[in-house]
Image (cartoon, helix red, strand yellow):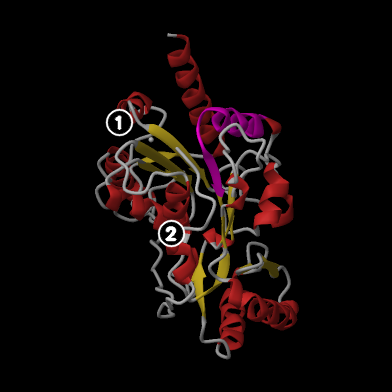
Amino acid sequence: MTKHTAFAAEDAVVAAPAPAQPGRRFTSYPPSSCRTAAAQRMDAGAAGAAARATGSWLDAVPRRAEHDDWMEKHPSALAGFESVLAAAKGKQVVMFLDYDGTLSPIVKDPDTAVMTEEMRDAVRGVAEHFPTAIVSGRCRDKVFNFVKLAELYYAGSHGMDIKGPTPESKHAKAKAEAVLCQPASEFLPVIDEVYRALTATTAAIPGATVENNKFCLSVHFRCVQEEKWRALEEQVRSVLKEYPDLRLTRGRKVLEIRPSIKWDKGNALQFLLEALGFADSNNVFPIYIGDDRTDEDAFKVLRNMGQGIGILVSKIPKETSASYSLREPSEVKEFLHKLVKSKQSKQRD
């Protein structure tokens, strides 16, 4: 185990908890949960995690057994597709999709994380039949430019910047475009200030890039030499000492800086369900697909609701609150196609 363990934890193989057990109209104003979120501060602090060491070939059998056990708890959403359909029967499916690592592969340069036309067609097909939202850590405008589908909801900055679809959307109703939630608006000046400070501070570390996602910042170190990881984190923390209202968390080779408010992708999911008219409804079946730690907040919301399913995109076992799994974006595309075909089949019957 190296001194850089904290950064490698995202790829660790760990035990997972049991999965969760498994209805539209629009409001023209943000529900109260959005309006009050900015006043609710969170305690800062990022929990570290230890990565599992790679064993010798003698460990292959235990690792295989662990993988099989994880797959039993989090089966493939493709292999278990009929079970998903059975759970969703008679309910309104609402689709939530992360972007990086879910609709597009993880790449070294975040600006080149474009989705394929085939994936865009798959998402477009889903949106024709179900309300669909993209929930990303990216700036909302940036992820929209990647996806380029006006009929979707977009929740950028880890859900802190939400906007509804255009009036031309098949699912939109009168004044639907007024659905908007920006609970961290007061943090915009400080986010810009910290962005400039981090850009200057990290410039000496080759490969480090700072991405301004409007209501949050991402410090990418995928292209940084491993021996520089600790120094990079120390530089980031040194800047954040002056900003107690911001918190630091980790993702897949990225450090995330966000306002310390009680708002995350799980809150964004709840806000959108409320905006769609499904608050406290038993007739809705949310499906959330994501690959990163920040998506766990949404998975936990679904588990606590006892409705819908979370699907983790990962090739290796990870601790998760998701009920199902998919290995990579190509499987996500296949799952979306199957969902559309099933809907079309029912319409013909």
In the rendered image, residue 292, in percent from the top left (x then y), is placed at: 49, 55
Q: Residue shown at 35%/40% (left/top)?
A: 308
User: Looking at this rendering, what residue extends furthest in the front direction?
Assistant: 174
Q: Residue shown at 42%/29% (left/top)?
A: 78
Question: Can the viewer see residue 295?
Answer: yes
* Front-most of residues 45 and 86: 86
User: Looking at this rendering, what residue extends furthest in the bottom direction?
Assistant: 242
The residue under label 1 is 87
Q: Main secondary structure of the magenta part?
A: helix
Q: Tell me if mark 1 has few (under 14), some (14-19) or many (20+) residues whose alpha carbon lies within 10 angstroms of its own.
A: some
Q: Residue shown at 36%/38% (left/top)?
A: 284
Mark identifier at residue 267: 2
Q: Is residue 302 left or right of residue 182?
A: left
In the rendered image, residue 87, in percent from the top left (x then y), is placed at: 30, 31
Q: Is residue 72 left or right of residue 201?
A: left
Mark 1 vs 2, N-terminal side: 1
Q: Is residue 285 magenta?
A: no
- Which amino acid, mark 1? Ala
Question: Can the viewer see residue 11?
Answer: no
In the rendered image, residue 81, in percent from the top left (x then y), is placed at: 38, 27
- Which amino acid, mark 2? Asn
* Front-most of residues 74 and 284: 284
- SS for tag 1? helix
Q: Which quadrant, please, contains the C terminus?
A: top left
| Quadrant in which residue 103 is drawn | top right
Q: CA distance from mark 1 to mark 2?
A: 23 Å
| Quadrant in which residue 71 is drawn | top left
The residue range painted magenta reads: 118-134
- SS for tag 2? helix
- Residue 230, above or below 316: below
